[in-house]
Image: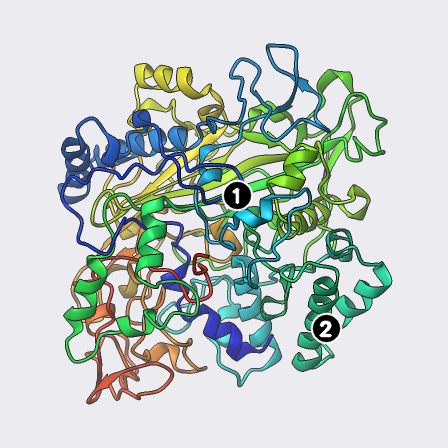
Amino acid sequence: MKTKNILSRISIVAVAVALSSSCSNSDKPASNTPTPTPVAQQTYSHFGPYQPLPTWSDWCPINSDPTKCTAALNNAVQQQSKDSRKTVRAHGWQLWAGISSPLENSGYDSKTNTSTMFGTQGCWAENTSKQSACSGVFPLWLSWPNTGLPYSPNSTSTLGASNTNNSNSAVAGLIQINRNFSHAIAADASSTQILDAQASKQNPDPTKTQTVNTVGTIPTYKVPALAIVKQCGLQEEQVKPQLAIAYDPKKSSKDQLQAWKTLDQLCTAQGYPDLVCPSASGICDGTAFVNQGDVMIATESLTTQAWDAIQNNALYSGSATLKDLYAKDNDKIAANKVASWFNTEFISTKHMFWPVKGCNPNAQQNEQGCRVRYGALPPWVPKNFKDKSYASNADYLGYEQWGEVVAIDTCGKKCTAASSASLELAHVEGASAITTQSPSIYKVNDFMHLQVSEETLNNAFTATDRALLDQATIWAYGDDSNGFEAGDFLVVVAMHVNTKEIDTWAFQSVWWSPMNDSLKDCPVDQYNHCFGQAGAYKATAYKYSGLNRKTVASLDKKVGKTWRENYLLTDSYGINYEINGEKVVASNYFTDTPPKWATQRPDGDAITMLPVSMNPYIEPVIHPLGTNCQNCHRRAGAVSKAPDQGEYAAGVGRANYQNAQCPSLLADYGMPGSDPCMIKPWAWNQNTQWDKPANNNCQAKDGTLCKGKEAYPIVNTDLSWFVADGHVQKAK
């Protein structure tokens, strides 16, 4: 894919990645205490009618006292103290437990943690009635609308449902976006790009080069031929030659694109027109999953209010609405227009499954039913990254770099134990297999998970969804795994839950943990290089979680204990305190005197800092470890392309996660209405010294709008993080 096209796609990345979050049932301004509209009978997915969050989830719109609930969150953000993070963390934990609740129509049996939805062929568990069942739970968010291809009821009528009533859709996954930047830079030093030569340093200067996209070897996940062969009903000799062309760096971009078009045509001829997407150089988005581009299987789901706001206000792919939101003669008009679109009922999520091959105790090992003895998952262990400075390190540190795996056992004592577990990373260029001898073994019940039956595989997932499952499974366990099959498992490794309960938005994110690290190995006050320690970030670390034993016991009674026993949570509400209640200061993150860019704006005004808050399974595939979700998304705004080489340091009058004017990924530059990068952006600043007043010479090109020598402000006073073009599809 050409660099120009990649950058165009990322043009509204800031506008994009948060879309796992929006809320409004109409285009009318929200009232202070909205009453959620009954939506239980609406259907947005193959998993049945929409099921909202349970009333006990502490989601403010359905709280018994919405005003009090919202006030508590607002006070934590607006009147910050050492206890503020405990307030929002307790809220986040309850949201996570609530959104993990089972679908009501899934035949869930809490005593055996099994389900019978769709059918049980290929599964081997039993429920309390001694009936055949599949292990795990169908979480309620599966019934929510999502950012993949819109649900079409016509595609559920027959076994082997396909996407034939929908149109192509795919947006590059995070790792693909990062890789495309890296490859474009290496291939053409004169092309449009963000990074410059200094980005090759481990700790580059963010006033001279952008560091929000990591540097180093970015793995290339190549679509396995088997995924297309299986789901399109083709022969290997039809698929492999085209993939060889598509990934051949010696071929022209035109030839590579044509190879993807040929694969699309071959699948279309077989009745699967929306399985290969040439525009994204890979598998399309499905109706249940979107193409993450690595082993993780992603879904970005929305409350109905969020979905309606996007649809009613034309914030979907192909709409010109986003372009109209750039400030022009009256920069307040567009901002106020945006603020009226979303209310407190907006929720967006980003959920990550990890594929695990099932091992049926009645099957022969290394054969169908138990092709792989153990699932393999790299665990986040904070002490392993103590040599990385969160303040400035920009290395690529995705899970491929973590060096070890834990074993996930789906069979238990009925099957012979294996001596090792391997993440094969097959068809992945730039990464090697990770094999751990005598690994730590975790039962599949140590994960929130779902075992997928033959009926579920064919009736709940489209052919494109199945292709996404296949490619992730083959990347993880190799071609001998035969991709994803009936009886295999999806385990939960990470999830963002983002809400509009307060004006400045509420971020919380969870991830799976082996819970075997110690605060002695990575103390809670070592902010510069320790994050995500089990002793501080787990629900029962009452000193930090804000929960108490009574609340935890109540949640356990409703959803079991798995939601907390191996999961950690971080929060990002814009609170300037560390998790232990200490004030965030720059000296926490620098061993020497902090540089000016970490402590002040270019005009000399002092700035505070936000703590590190990221999901280790999601962010490091594109961003450095030292980031804060809230900080990046505040600067979401419409841009048409990234700066040309050499323009980063001068600014181009457009928003992005980071620019030379506001370079620190942890600095708190304020809300968009006061952030100088939003209201007075640098635009071809002629001054070469970072801490001198701007001398702009704005150029009206590539989407930048000028008012004389100055650039117009970037509109984003509602922190709306709207959906990027090409991300959400227009409803059918």
Residue 405 is at least partly visible in this image: no
- Report the disc number at residue 259: 2
- Residue 435, compared with residue 246, is above or below; it is above
Instruction: Kindly identify the residue that appears in the image at 37 percent across and 15 percent down.
Output: 553
User: Residue 663, percent across and down?
Assistant: 33, 66
Residue 216 is at least partly visible in this image: yes
- Residue 180, compared with residue 361, is above or below; it is below
User: Residue 412, percent across and down?
Assistant: 71, 19
- Residue 514, compared with residue 348, is above or below; it is above
Q: Secondary structure beneath disc 2?
A: helix
Colour scheme = rainbow
Compare residues 47 and 698 and report the one nearer the observer.
47
User: Residue 160, percent across and down?
Assistant: 69, 45
Mark nearer the N terminus (1 vs 2): 2
Compare residues 593 and 25 and report the one nearer the observer.
25
Residue that numbered label 1 is attached to: 352
